[in-house]
Image (cartoon, rainbow, N blue to C red):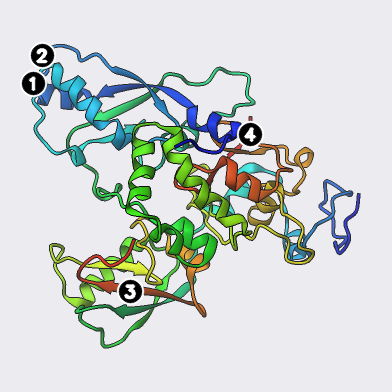
Amino acid sequence: MSIANSDTTTYPNNSSSTFLNTNLVENANSQVSLNPATALEKYKKKDSSKVVVRFRAIGNAPILKQNFYKITASNKFQAVIQFLRKELNYKTSDPLFLYINSAFSPAPDEIVANLHKCFSTDQHLIINYCTSAAWG
Amino acid sequence: MTAPQNPITRAIWDGALPIKLSLDTTEAAALGAKTIIEPYFIEAPRCSYFPLLTSQLRKYFGDMMLNFIGDDAEIWYDVDGTPLKHYPIGLLYDLHTGYRPDSNSPPPLPWPVTVHFKDFPADKLIRAQAIDATQDFFMNGSTKKVMNLSKNDQTQLWDGLWSKNYDRFWSVNYRLVMNDGQMPRHIPLRIYLPDNCPVLQEPVSPLDDNNGNPLTLGDVLHQILPELFPSSLPSENSFAAPVIHGVIPQLDMPIVWASQNLCYPDNFLHIVVLLGI
């Protein structure tokens, strides 16, 4: 079986597989293991890379001196909320709402890496914050 | 109002799980239980959420003379010591039991779940639940569609889910899922792996960038998880299997079809990946 545009790299255990996507060459070249446990290790590893988040105040929310920060991608969104609260000197009882792209408020247990992959604009994850509910 | 006929979404909507809900034993004693408290058995819709069962449970355990006076938001659930998140019930079952529908052993039913009335694990669970508009943003790059639903339609979506009324829910949701006949920009999808791996959520295009052909479920799994799905064809994926609504779907279905027909009520395609058999 062969598919147009496919490369001819093969897995050690299967000489007939071809791939739809040329960017998969990389995966094929690295040691591909068919052992479930080792295959899973890769996905268990925490993403230690950093992503840029940009904060934008809305309404009467105080603005920050610096409005963009680098944050570790494997953090949960909860960490972003706590960080912003600290920067603003807000107590847990003070109302603070965070949104992405002026559209929705992610669950605190969402992973920042996922949000960045899905919703970033020019590599920046734009987070709007305000002291009363605005969207969603 | 009736929803467009679709036997697939109907069957998924009607999917239910027998659950055995037991009160945590030390809590039962603290709440004044003098004898052993019988568990509560319920057949819960796979697409529903545990907080929607809470009022029934309160009544049942209240009738047992347990004097619990706290708020509903204090009630939480666990399986084998792991607190259950705010996911749909069917997804939690697939995720926590890790039961492969193609295995020879019988499914672990009724599913044993422990109920807690106190000591909410605030570090592990989120108390308040917001209905989010993420899925619409995902598909269109804006939340316009969900935000533009009339108040009436929004209420009907929620009511339909709450009262298990298929027609009420799907007559509104159909418009969201079909996206006015436009091909969505991305497919709202989340992948759950075993062993506490972080949840995967990536922008997945419904079409192949190179030739515009529809991508299949197998293509998408192969793209995102090349180690677990070394091929997009079923015969070559021996140890990993995707499970959606307790079923192993065929890998050759177009991902856009899967999204429109097999999504949960939040319109996300939640895929649990299980290994081995």
Q: Nearer the viewer, mark 2 or mark 3?
A: 3
- Mark identifier at residue A128: 3
Above or below: residue A135 compared with residue A51: above
Asked if marks 2 and 3 fall on the same chain, the answer is: no
Where is mark 4, residue-wise? B248
* Quarter residue A87 falls in: bottom left
From the viewer's side, name the closer residue of B271 and B185: B185
Labels 4 and 2 in the same subunit: yes
In the figure, residue A79 lies in which quadrant? bottom left
Amino acid type for the residue under numbered disc 3: Asn
Are the residues flagged by discs 4 and 2 in contact, CB closer than 8 Å?
A: no
Q: Residue at x 37, y 71 (%)?
A: A102
Answer with left or right where residue B192 lies relative to residue B28.
right
Q: Are marks 2 and 1 in contact (CB under 8 Å)?
A: yes
Percent x, y of residue A46 = 48, 60
Task: Say left or right for B33 vs A116.
Answer: left
- For badge 4, the amino acid type reads Ile
